[in-house]
Image (cartoon, coloured by chain):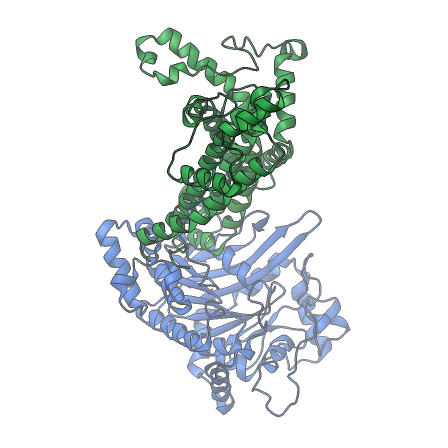
Chain colours: A blue, B green
Amino acid sequence: MSHTDDGEPLLAVDNLRTVFHSEREEIRAVDGVSFDIERGETLGIVGESGSGKSVTARSIMGLVDSPGEIREESSIRLDGRELTTLSEKQYRSVRGGDIAMVFQDPLSSLNPVYTVGNQIIEALELHRGMEGTEAKSEAIELLRAVGIPDAARRVDEFPHEFSGGMRQRAVIAMALACDPDLLICDEPTTALDVTIQAQILDLLQEIQTERDIGIMFITHDMGVIAEVADRVAVMYAGEVVEKAPVEELFANPHHPYTQGLLQSIPGRNPSTDRLPTIEGDVPTPHESASYCRFVSRCPKGFDECERVHPAHVEVGESADHTAACLLYPEDMPTDDTVTHHEENADQTGAEASEALSADDWPAERRKAGEDTGPTGSEDSDARADGGHSHSAGDTGGQLEGGDTDE
Amino acid sequence: MSRFTYLFKRVALSIPVIIFGTTVTFAIIRLGPLSPAAAILGPQGDARAIRQIEKRLGLNDPLWEQYFDFMSNLFLFDLGQSWVINSGTPAIDLIISYAPRTIWLGFWAVLIALGIGIPLGFYAGLNPNTFSDYFASFGGIVWRAMPNFWLAVILVTVLSQSEQLFGFSWTSFIVETNVVTSPNLAVLKNPTRLLTDPGQAWTNLAKATKQILPPALVLGSASMGTEMRIGRTAVLETINSKYVETAKAKGVSPRVLVWKHIFRNALIPLVPVITAEAFILIGGSVLVETVFSINGIGLLFFRAAEQGDLPLVGTLMYLFILLIVGLNIVQDFAYTIIDPRVGYDG
């Protein structure tokens, strides 16, 4: 994992708030989200439908259109450069050039009336100034790089002549056309069957090692997360509720929501008759959070959860494992933890997030945490377990079932 | 399947359609209550004269014989002579002399529909839920809702009294014309006169255009409304599709996004609407030409059908059917060009 010279992470998202205005109210789709991504690292973002994963991705891409709006206090820095203040025209060169995105549904993310080659060449022309035969041979090279056989012939074919997996490879080739630093994958494997899924995940990992890019991987499939992610951020109702290195998260989940998610993976509880689920739906947040948004579904909720907004606190063994829950820090009695969170929540939302994000995942600490490595046999079990549920074709690990739409 | 075999197959498949259409025409004219002989003689004709004419026209021959004569002549393009309208004149000559005014009318009707309906629809789709979108959409519904026979009458009434109603005289606007009359298209038959005798020729062209605009607007109004609405929906659907978002995420500029990624995809659902205009034009021209008393094909067809002029009606129907079948084949070819997913198979 290489760092940029000034110690800035590749992507630093700080207190991101994206709201959508409707006639009656505003919907806080993303409400104070902060995280970093380093080069060569994969951050997994998990959560149910409606938890704000995709809106986070679109915010980073600058693709939030009216009636959506990124609030002023938000900050998105790529290699130290603030993106939220860029003009639309400046943002266009970032889009596709510095940050590329792979969407959920490969069947519909290619324009049906143009050849695959045409669409890759379009990106090459836009960001690398290539033209004519040079662009075409580069497009063929890219298709070959993502494992499309007979690329020279297929470059002139239309998307409908490609199979689902091939199409997603072509979309990835298109995303890689401009040598992005950051690749955002919004559920890139959800629409694919499991064997193809595994191939695409392998491909992404290969690309990451080869090009040293940061990947932000959005999914609701815990099995996929176990496979690809280095660190995980769990989102709920527009907020990040728990962040942890992947082994740590699987072995030692702290937030009741994360625990619920992990319990609802088939195969993790082979002894039970019925698969545990989290009752209810993700609420749509309209107002700034003065309480825990998970409380209505939380099996461990208590009275204070209704009036105190939890702040992130360090939990677990690794230093960069934090959870936003009034149950923690674990070593304090509950009354004290409530006061602890209250003190943090007393500040305005923006300041609170500011204060938190300042020592969110400081690079040195994160490194230190990594050096300790996966601890105990529990960790490796969890890893294997997650991997197993994926490779065994167990799509039941998905939290949303057939609903692939956000 | 190659393009050529596809075309061959389509042509072969259209033959039953043509036979069916012409057969129905024959049946309606010959089995219905129309008597061409009575129409020729007028109300004073006596029974003997009628029988004589019926005999001369071969109307007393066995019906199947008449049918086979009719059909074989049509297919050999031996289109016969008019019985009633202009007795003894070859049907095709009559049609050729009436056609230019209808073509002129149809040309402007299509131009108004395509040139206003589609751009307006695309504009509305690109700016959804704005005031201009509501304005255009509402206009589209209004145009669509006004039946052309009604609109034609209203337009004639309003335009011929525009002086009294609005203090603006349509008849003397730019060039002096009547509201209800056939346009004089002599200048189009001799386009060189636009250069040799510019003063007179351009005035005539302006007159011909001004005269045809109100009926063309009536004729094109419904298609204009339909194209506007379908265009708007098509653009909205395309804008919200995943590949447009992918293109945006690639950093494509808004101009390229609209013209390359949205426009061509939005055109696909418009193709059948545009070709369907042909049917509306043929049907509508009968009404519009009658109201605006334009001596065109529509008026000719109406009078011929009314009076049982079988050769003329048969010829016109035959040409209409050929036109529509041909347009359908063109439409399917247009699909294969615009949308690569449409193949020649199946």
Residue, x 52% and y 23% (percent of image)? Answer: B84
- Say how many tags the image has: 0
Which residue is nearer to you in this view: A395 or B164?
Answer: B164
Q: Residue B108, image x and y in percent? A: 47, 26
Q: Nearer the viewer, residue A229 or A197?
A: A197
In this orientation, which residue lies closer to the viewer: B259 or B176? B176
Judge whether A393 appears above or below B143 on screen.
below
**Relative horizontal placement of residue A266, taking residue A210 as reference (left or right):** right
The outermost residue toward the left is: A133
Q: Quadrant of residue A175?
A: bottom left
* Residue A249 visible in the shown view: yes
Above or below for A191 versus B326: below
Residue A84 x, y percent position in the rendering: 49, 51
A371 left or right of A397? left
A94 relative to A224 in the view: left or right: left
Residue B10 is situated, as x and y percent measured from the top left of the image, at 39, 50
Vertical placement of residue A399 versus A122, above or below: below
Residue ID at (46%, 45%): B19
- The quarter of the rendered structure image containing the C terminus of chain A is bottom right
The quadrant of the image that shows the N terminus of chain A is bottom left
Judge left or right: residue A289 versus residue B174.
right
Q: Can the viewer see residue A1 in this picture?
A: no
Residue extending furthest toward the right: A303
Q: Position of residue A146 (x, y in %)?
A: 32, 68
Q: Nearer the viewer, residue A122 or A84?
A: A122
**Relative height, residue B325 to residue A20 (above, below):** above
Q: Residue at x 31, y 12 (%)?
A: B195
